[in-house]
Image (cartoon, rainbow, N blue to C red):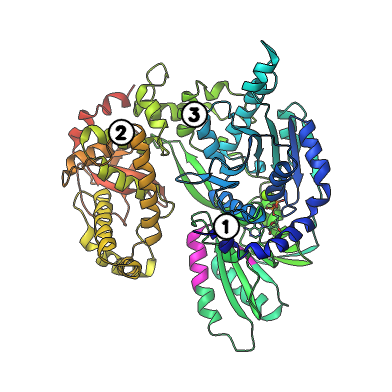
Amino acid sequence: MEGDNQNINGAGPSTNGLLQDQRKLLPIARGRDALVREIQENDVTILLGETGSGKTTQIPQYLLESGASGSGIIAVTQPRRVAATSLAVRVAAEQNDKLGKRVGYSVRFDERSSPETRIKYLTDGMIVRELLSDPLLSQYSVIIVDEAHERTLRTDLLISNLKMIQGKRNHRSTGSKEKEKEKFNPLKIVIMSATLDAEKFSMFYQNAKIIYVKGRQHPVKVYHSLESQTDYVESAMRTFFQIHTDQTPGDVLIFLPGQEDIESLEKSIRLFANQLPHDVMDVLICSMYAAQAPGQNSKVFLPSPARTRKCILATNIAETSITIPGVKYVIDTGMCKEKRYLARNTGGGFDTLLTRAITKSSAMQRAGRAGREGMGLCFRLYTEDAFDTMDLSPEPEILRCSLTSSILQLKCLNQDLEDLDLMDMPDTESISSALKTLWLLDAIDQNKELTPLGRQMALFPLEPVHARAVIASREQGCTSEVLDIISVLSASSKLFVDVAEHREAASEARRMFRHASGDHLTILNVIRAYSDISTTGGKAARREWCRKHFLNEKTLSEASEIRSQLRQACGRMRIDWNVSCGDGEGQLLKSLAYGLAQNSAFLQPDGSYKQTMGHSVIKIHPGSVLCDKKVPAIIYDELIYTNQIYARGVSSVQKSTFTAIGALNRRSS
Ligand code: ADP
Ligand code: MG
């Protein structure tokens, strides 16, 4: 598509002059030469600066334009994919180039780059994955670790590996110097953060130099609720309309924990906005959250039309990674979603997303978003006492998330997590739980050594449990079907739209897809039906079909992208993805069971299910096809905790399957 990145930004070649003017006005622009010099002179630079000062978009361009990055590529890592893609779009426009040429991105299941690419925005997960094929990350001359204060698991692993890599690339003194230099071009590391925690990074890198970039922050008046709010979505809506009717023009940014709350608030604001008197400004709602496709959120960056107030509904992605212009009012629900590993009493541990109170540092960042262009107001939907009891800053992810997939990747690099030089060390319980999972999957042997199977699993851009199922499907002759199902499970949103008011209608509309063996084959039925619709009908027909059956069309289209990526991965590993078992559900369930053996439970005489590899009693989730059924044995995708422990994504399997795949022999060892 000719110039599609320009369209996304509303910035064609004629407006590039304007973009250049905007660049020059950013707070960071004055320090340009000094910054380039510092980065050139130091192996590691810690750069601290107010959100919106221009760190993420400008530093890579300064390094490129000044020639400081040499012939290598500049990598900029981001914890979230939507940040990586939207920043690449912006910087490509600023470089007046098409996305994927000199400026590109690389995120899981999606890449836009070419041999010409000189600045690459990637997720921290992608660059850790690149270590597998290029352990010295030799194609990069500068690696900028952005949003380091978020301390994601992958960022921590990267920071540790970069220290090692730099040692190898910059300080080799054996043999002919010239020859070594050729082979190991030196690496510059830049750690960027928006909060005041630079000391710890500096200490980790032998007292690396810390540079402060001054931002342009105007005063923000903060209001707290007088009483605690029980329903933050409703309270956010009321606060928004108060601002809308009482306050001067200026856009409103509302922080919510996740996509579901964003969608529900959007609906209610829309409903009330339509009933406003004519003399009140119009409302334009935009949203920003992780599961959006590249370009889907581009309208948040466009100026509000005349007589219109923009209302942006965002998750903590708008806290520091992405700066939205025009915001004067912030509404902070005080909540976020946090990934947390549940190891105890559950047999195999796993990650769940929990909605919880934010930290003080988040609350301050959120308020700061109101004061970027002038004086602002921030409305906190929690009391001042609640603020006082908040944690100071979030706990590093490495201390609270599943380590399974990371440990597997490290094993492929001949590294053991226990031996790494890390900023924070995870506890032994979560390391041993991850090792146990890998052992149950046959990825490592009794001596914790990587098996050939484990090495193969690591090559898939998938969770190890899913990679295991794909590999098993080869022997079972059902790779085509397993890829169909795994792509839906790997998509960022759920396939089945779950709205409390329409639960019965939805279940009725989806009756035709129900498969007696459970939710996995039900998903397969949906995919088959969707692909029939796709071949016979157009876009409108597909959309209508999804709406009618309460299916999330975005999940289906994302899944089909993921599926093509997985087919390519299979191709590289000489697994024929086209092999199909037709209606041979036994083979299909067996393949899945290879991956999900740890997520299995047997029926008890009293009608409950007990985990085979843990001690918990679980129930089948009401949303499952198998909800009222009593089958001897089940496998499931995940457990969720409410007042009870529910298994979600459930299929019925023969008990003998577990014996056949040798899963139960391992559980007691
Ligand atoms: P920092 O990394 O210091 O927080 P950034 O480099 O992300 O700052 O942002 C600098 C400026 O670029 C901000 O004013 C922001 O609004 C603007 N900007 C960033 N991304 C986009 C985009 N996709 N579209 C329009 N403007 C953008
Ligand atoms: Mg930034």
Mark 3, residue position: 133
Question: Where does the C terminus fall, quadrant-wise?
Answer: top left
At x 42% / y 52%, what residue is drawn?
Answer: 642
Pointer 3 residue Cβ closer than 8 Å to ligand 2 = no
**Which residues are the magenta region?**
253-267
Residue 482, percent across and down? Answer: 28, 43
Using the image, tell me which numbered label, if any, was put on residue 471: 2
Q: Quadrant of residue 598?
A: top left
In three-dimensional space, the C-alpha distance between marks 1 and 3, rounded to whole angstroms, equals: 34 Å
First in sequence: mark 3 vs mark 2 = 3
Q: Give the image location of residue 660, x and y in percent.
A: 20, 29
Question: Dot 1, crowdedness within 10 Å: few (<14), some or many (≥20)?
Answer: many
Nearer to us in this view, 167 or 404: 167
Q: Is residue 239 left or right of residue 65?
A: left
Q: Position of residue 648 (x, y in %)?
A: 34, 49
Where is residue 42, by image quadrant? top right
Q: Residue furthest top?
A: 175
- Residue 189 position in % (x across, y down): 69, 33
For label 1, the residue is 315
Name which residue lies at 37% across and 70% down. 501
Report helix, strand or loop for mark 2.
Answer: helix
- Say what amino acid the circle numbered 1 marks: Thr
Q: Is residue 263 magenta?
A: yes
Up/down of 121 relative to 438, above or below: below
Is residue 448 found inside the magenta-colored segment of the image? Answer: no
Residue type at mark 3: give it.
Answer: Ser
Q: Where does ligand 1 appear, by image quarter?
A: bottom right
Q: Tag 2: residue type?
A: Ile
Q: Nearer the viewer, mark 3 or mark 2?
A: 3
